[in-house]
Image: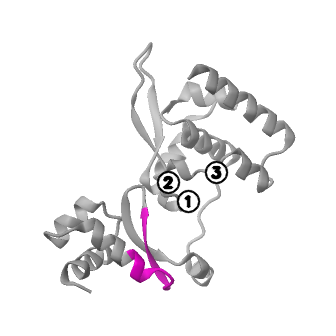
Amino acid sequence: MEEFERAVEAAIFASSEPLSPEEIAAFAGEGEVAAALAALSQIYTGHGIELVERGGRWHFQTAPDLAHILRRTREESRRLSRAATETLAIVAYHEPVSRAEIEAIRGVQISKGTLDVLMEAGWVRTAGRREGPGRPLLYATTVDFLTHFGLGSRRDLPGIDDLKAAGLLDPLDEAALQLQLESDEEEA
């Protein structure tokens, strides 16, 4: 392993947060960061820890097939309410989205606390304001959301076929989702 790759490996390992290629270059010095990341990813493939990219940022994580070993030492987090789960899904699939748009899709009002919980978890952030009457705040997902759910980008979110295969859509939900998708396509 060449010296620059070792410096990249050390920078990622020592960081408490995932690093962008630019941040890695700032720590490791002059060199081809992309090539070093590709080489390190190859080296760590199949090991107990893996080098992964999530949302354009790199970090080490436990290999997915060994995660069960560490689950008992992991802190159990609070489960999200149904409202928070639905809101998170709407933000992820429709971002950037306003509170009014979230409420229109859900069909009910959301409490301010629902978005606060998602923002405190670090999964949702404000993403500016919509140009229009009242200039409502817009919400979007974060890199922490991608990291927590093991997604490289929002394109990796499951589609309708994936949700059907997993048995997560009942016939009424499926019909409502199909109507929403058709409505979104007409607007685009």
Residue hosting label 3? 158
Q: Is residue 11 above or below residue 123?
A: below
Q: Secondary structure at mark 1?
A: loop
- The magenta-colored residue range is 41-53
Mark 1 vs 3: CB contact within 8 A: no
Mark 1 vs 2: CB contact within 8 A: yes
Q: Closer to the observer: label 3 or label 2? A: 3
- Choose the circle earlier in sequence order: 3 or 2: 2
Q: CA distance from mark 3 to mark 2?
A: 14 Å
Instruction: Give the quarter of the image for residue 170.
Output: top right
Q: Secondary structure at mark 2?
A: helix
The x and y percentages for residue 50 are 45, 77
Q: Is residue 105 left or right of residue 48?
A: right
- Say what amino acid the circle numbered 3 marks: Pro
Location of the N terminus by quadrant is bottom left
Q: Residue at x 34, y 76 (%)?
A: 39
Tag shown at residue 157? none
Tag shown at residue 145? 2
Rate crowding at label 1 as few (under 14), some (14 to 19) or many (20 or more) other CA atoms within 10 Å.
few
Q: Secondary structure at mark 3?
A: loop
Residue hosting label 1? 149
Q: Is residue 30 visible?
A: yes
